[in-house]
Image (spheres, rainbow, N blue to C red):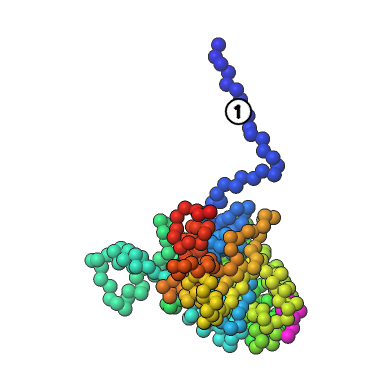
Amino acid sequence: MAATKAPATKERKSSFSRNFSAPPESSVPGLKKGLNGTIFLSSGIPDLDEILGGGFHLGSLVMIMEDTEAPHHMLLLRNFMSQGLVHNQPVLYASPSKNPRDFLGTLPSILVSKDDKSRKTDSEPKDLRIAWQYKKYHGENKPHFEEQDGKAEYCNDFDLKKPIEKHLIMENRVECVSLLDCPSLAGLRDSCSKFLSQIPRYDGKLTSAGRIAIQSFCAPQCEYYDKEWDMLSFIRSLKSMVRTSNAVAFLTFPASLVSSSVSKRLQHMADTLLSVKAIPDEDKELASLLTGYQDMLGLLSVQKVARFNTQVPVILDATTFSIKLQKRRSLVLECLNQAPVDGSSGSSYGTSGSCSGSSKTGALDF
């Protein structure tokens, strides 16, 4: 008599159990899917994406507390905008200047390594000769973003010494607004609302995303500077509009130039809150305590990290990082390390693999 096969029993799971398998990758350049249905948008700085667990949450309000003594917040703002242009994402830029469009010429270009240059030279057909004045039209239909193994780069390194290509600004949707023309902030609110309404909303299939970049929101030269309630009301409206759209709002403000009550309320409304601070040129006491002090541009502190679709708190290994330029071109963030006896320097956050803060990578050292 043939043996009967026992029926397979299904494993019973609790109603609270979830499948934490690896999230699928997004097919849209510049976006990455995370756990619990979250979607990340790149900040334009690989180390910052690593620190925040993937980047900026789509639909979030990111705020940067400026240091009035140094414009380090502009480094973050430029990379954020350039990353959007590289991925063909619409960008809205607002600043307290008369001609905000002039700022677009200061955006950095993608950093091209020597290996990439040699690879491009080898890939060009040797038997095809093009006059130099027509070379700029050769391959203009190719995607602007770099690719590795056939996949678009999620985040790029940018060369702060090389301006972005003009065709990226001309071919993409870039809107510029002067905060000097918005005495009651109603005009800025309408511009943001119109900009977000033209971005397709998420209906199960994500097709594109937008970026809003507002520089020095509470600058004294703005007419609404003394209208605290109007400023707070605008931030509430902006956060509400962004939350229901496929966009990220990136806003910087000088915390030291507004009242403490307004500053605290602005910080509370931010989903992700960062602060930048300049360091003295010659501080012997600080130089003796920190590794690579002479190469530091400033300090970046993570005050708050956005939490979407989860109640689990975000615990970071470190909250303060040094801002440096790698080879005086690309922006990197490094953990603050105590200066050792031999005076060796630290390593970038994304490449550091040691719990002891050593510059050498390898096995975890507890």
User: Would you say residue 16 is visible in this rendering?
Assistant: yes
Q: Is residue 98 above or below residue 109?
A: below
- Picture coordinates of residue 151 (x, y %)? 44, 57
The answer to which of 58 and 143 lies nearer the viewer is 58
User: Would you say residue 88 is visible in this rendering?
Assistant: no
Q: Would residue 229 be found to the left or right of residue 146 on screen?
A: right
Q: Is 175 included in the stretch rendered in magenta? A: no
Q: Residue placed farthest to the left in the image?
A: 127
Q: Would residue 151 be found to the left or right of residue 226 on screen?
A: left
Region in magenta: 226-232
The answer to which of 85 and 336 lies nearer the viewer is 336
Q: Would residue 163 be found to the left or right of residue 245 on screen?
A: left
Q: Residue placed farthest to the top in the image?
A: 1
Q: Quadrant of residue 127?
A: bottom left
The answer to which of 220 and 124 lies nearer the viewer is 220
Q: Residue at x 55, y 11 (%)?
A: 1
Q: Is 227 included in the stretch rendered in magenta? A: yes
Q: Residue at x 51, y 62 (%)?
A: 357
- List the residue tagged with mark 1: 8
Q: Residue placed farthest to the front in the image?
A: 341
Q: How many marks?
A: 1
Amino acid at circle 1 = Ala
- Picture coordinates of residue 62 (x, y %)? 63, 69
Q: Quadrant of residue 234?
A: bottom right
Q: Residue at x 24, y 66 (%)?
A: 126
Q: Residue at x 40, y 56 (%)?
A: 149
Dominant SS in magenta: helix
- Picture coordinates of residue 312 (x, y %)? 67, 55
